[in-house]
């Protein structure tokens, strides 16, 4: 099935973009995302996690770095177990680039004033009284899905996988990467 080239660039740019180019571009965009997030009050505190809280630039960069390292290492180990030989640089570059959609969430953070966590614990319904926060939560869902689709395609193309092995190993690796990133952030930060 042939589809529009612009759609292909949005969900699977990795047939044309990989290696050092993807790595350098991904690192630059991840740094930009973390810096914007530190100013807009968005924390990227896990492979998939997003929370609205203020962090310093150093804290934001550290959390983003730990989550990216977790993502790359777990998928690399999974690829070594499941896939034919592949280039580490292709996997690392494409996986880092998959976090690019989160820049939109970092920008959305400028329009949101999240409710105080203390009030959320005592009165959870307060979340729904803050329309900007609800809109940000709703918009974060398709952006996170987009990022996961990019991760799936990056892993698929970089490791040359398909079928059941691809689906099962991707799911397990993503869950493990999320758990490890959250654990590292908790103990290191």
Image (cartoon, grey):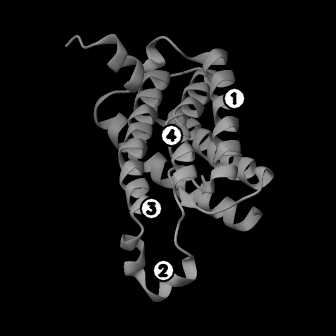
Q: Residue at x 52, y 58 (%)?
A: 112
Name the residue that disc number 4 marks. Answer: 104
Percent position of residue 154, x then y? 47, 28
Percent position of residue 2, x then y? 23, 10
Task: Name which of mark 4 and mark 2 comes first in the sequence.
Answer: 4
Q: Nearer the viewer, mark 2 or mark 3?
A: 3
Q: Quadrant of the C terminus?
A: bottom right
Name the residue that disc number 2 marks. Answer: 120
* Element assignment for label 4: helix
87 over 183 or under it: above or below: above
**Horizontal placement of 87 versus 81: left or right?**
right
* Element assignment for label 3: helix
Q: CA distance from mark 4 to mark 1?
A: 15 Å
**Horizontal placement of 10 versus 60: left or right?**
left
Q: CA distance from mark 1 to mark 2?
A: 35 Å
Q: CA distance from mark 3 to mark 4?
A: 15 Å
Q: Residue at x 38, y 55 (%)?
A: 135
**Horizontal placement of 152 versus 58: left or right?**
left
Q: Nearer the viewer, mark 3 or mark 4?
A: 3
Percent position of residue 136, x then y? 43, 54
Name the residue that disc number 3 marks. Answer: 133
**Residues packed near mark 4 inside 10 Å, few (<14), some (14 to 19) or many (20 plus):** some
Task: Name which of mark 2 and mark 3 comes first in the sequence.
Answer: 2
Task: Name which of mark 4 and mark 1 comes first in the sequence.
Answer: 1
Name the residue that disc number 1 marks. Answer: 28
Task: Name which of mark 3 and mark 4 comes first in the sequence.
Answer: 4
Name the residue furthest bottom: 122
Who is closer to the viewer here, 187 or 26? 26
**Residues packed near mark 1 inside 10 Å, few (<14), some (14 to 19) or many (20 plus):** some
Q: CA distance from mark 2 to mark 3?
A: 12 Å
* Element assignment for label 1: helix
**Residues packed near mark 2 inside 10 Å, few (<14), some (14 to 19) or many (20 plus):** few
């Amino acid at each position: 099935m042939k589809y529009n080239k612009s759609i292909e660039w949005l969900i699977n740019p990795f047939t044309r973009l990989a290696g050092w180019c993807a790595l350098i571009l991904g690192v630059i965009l991840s740094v930009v995302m973390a810096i914007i997030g530190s100013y807009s009050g968005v924390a990227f505190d896990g492979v998939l996690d997003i929370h609205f809280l203020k962090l310093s630039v150093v804290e934001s960069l550290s959390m983003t770095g730990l989550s990216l390292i977790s993502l790359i290492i777990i998928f690399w180990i999974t690829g070594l177990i499941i896939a034919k030989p592949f280039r580490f640089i292709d996997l690392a570059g494409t996986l880092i680039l998959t976090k690019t959609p989160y820049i939109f969430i970092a920008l959305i953070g400028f329009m949101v004033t999240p409710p105080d966590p203390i009030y959320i614990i005592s009165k959870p319904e307060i979340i729904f009284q803050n329309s900007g926060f609800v809109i940000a939560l709703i918009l974060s869902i398709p952006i996170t899905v987009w990022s996961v689709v990019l991760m799936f395609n990056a892993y698929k193309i970089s490791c040359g996988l398909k079928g059941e092995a691809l689906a099962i190993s991707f799911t397990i690796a993503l869950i493990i990467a999320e758990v490890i990133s959250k654990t590292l952030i908790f103990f290191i930060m």
